[in-house]
Amino acid sequence: MKKIFLIILIALNGSCATNKNITTQRSNTLYLPHNDFKDITNDKYVASVNKDTISITQIKYNYVYTEFLLKKIMFDKFGKWDESRYKENERHPVLVWKQVKLFPNRDTLYMVAATGGGEAEQKIYSSVMVFDEQGRDLLAINSELRNDVTEYFTELIQQNNNNKKEFYSVYWKEVDPKFYKKYIK
């Protein structure tokens, strides 16, 4: 199992190509409150690992207030991430939480990778990739839990307490200490 997670984590660092498939349209406006989004897309995150191609599905919540939204929500709910992974030429890492219990009525533990982007193009999104203990992609089209996971994170976004700010201090202190000292501290 550790080998599967290692391959997934390596893939998160790989070069990516996306294949968009819009699943939900919620609003026609571009400016949304802190706990909403315009639509959801499922993208294929394709990476090369040791001459093999790995395809990972991510759910993107598009036109959110900040690309950090799902990172913050995961932090608020599960505490500090276990690992941070940088994609090539990216300022912000993919944050990874290992062995988190997403659903109270299930004993299964999951690995969640949260990321975001699009600020330069003003198409801000926040996204997650979710894997079970065997390293299976829970957002793949044939996954039984795809809709449950999508609904779970949709609810977390809607319940987000924007007044909780601790994530930003912890995040910037680790990711960019100079920025932290100048603007956050």
Image: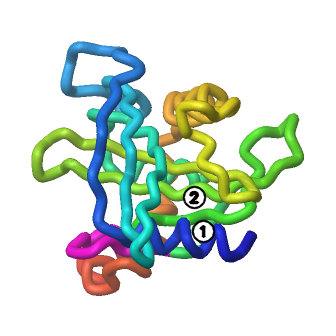
The one of 117 and 13 positioned closer to us in this rendering: 13
Q: Amino acid at mark 1?
A: Lys
Residue labelled with disc 2: 75
Q: Measuring 41% from the left and 35% from the top, which residue is drawn there?
A: 42
Q: Is residue 77 visible?
A: no
- State the SS at label 2: helix
In space, the residues marked 2 and 1 are separated at their CA atoms by 5 Å
Q: Main secondary structure of the magenta part?
A: loop
Question: Magenta part of the protein: which range?
Answer: 84-92
Residue 124 location (% of width, % of height) = 24, 43
Which of the numbered marks, if any, corresponds to residue 80? 1
How is the protein colored in the picture?
A: rainbow
Residue 61 location (% of width, % of height) = 38, 35
**In the shown orientation, is residue 10 left or right of residue 74?**
left
Quarter holding residue 29: top left
Q: Amino acid at mark 2?
A: Phe
The one of 19 and 74 positioned closer to us in this rendering: 19
Which of the numbered marks, if any, corresponds to residue 184? none
Image quarter hosting the N terminus: bottom right
Q: Is residue 27 visible?
A: yes
The one of 136 and 70 positioned closer to us in this rendering: 136
